[in-house]
Amino acid sequence: MANGKDCLVGDIILKIKFDYLCFMRAIKNIETKISQLSPGLIGELDHYLDYLINKRVVHRSQKLRQDWAGGLIDIQMSAIDLQKKALEWRLK
């Protein structure tokens, strides 16, 4: 008699095989569709695939840089005056 752990492992293996077969069927369907495309559409498909691949790329966030700190030390304005001046620059 198999214990629960063996049944769980068997279920996992069965799921992996099923997923693999579904994946292979999808690949075969895609290959069939690609073979029906004209050369111009294959070029478009190539660009679209590049787009999809790059869309999924996870960009790592960089460490917050604070090398700007103290950069305005020589300006003789209050923070409020500087905010008003920045607003004027944005509205131009």
Image (cartoon, rainbow, N blue to C red):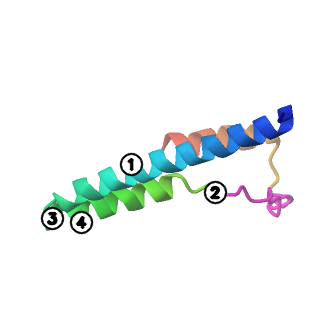
Task: Give amino acid for label 4.
Answer: Gly
Q: Nearer the viewer, residue 33 or 40?
A: 33
Asked if the residue under mark 4 is in contact with the one under mark 3, i.e. CB atoms within 8 Å, the reply is yes
Element type at marker 4? helix
Q: CA distance from mark 1 to mark 4?
A: 21 Å
Task: Give amino acid for label 1.
Answer: Ala
Query: Of discs 3 and 2, which sits in the foreground?
Result: 3
Q: CA distance from mark 1 to mark 3?
A: 23 Å
Query: Of discs 1 and 4, which sits in the foreground?
Result: 1
Q: CA distance from mark 1 to mark 2?
A: 29 Å
Task: Give amino acid for label 2.
Answer: His
Query: Of discs 4 and 2, which sits in the foreground?
Result: 4
Up-down: is 57 above or below 90?
below
Label number found at residue 59: 2
Asked if the residue under mark 2 is in contact with the one under mark 3, i.e. CB atoms within 8 Å, the reply is no
Q: Which residue is mark 3?
A: 40
Q: Residues within 10 Å of mark 2 (few under 14, many from 20)?
A: few
Query: What residue is shown at x 15% (from left), y 65% (from top)?
Result: 40
Element type at marker 2? loop
The image position of residue 22, as x and y in percent, is 46, 45
Whichever of callouts 1 and 4 sits on the residue coming sooner in the sequence is 1
Q: Which residue is mark 1?
A: 26
Q: Which residue is mark 4?
A: 43
Residue 64 as seen in the image, left or right of residue 31: right
Query: Of discs 1 and 3, which sits in the foreground?
Result: 1
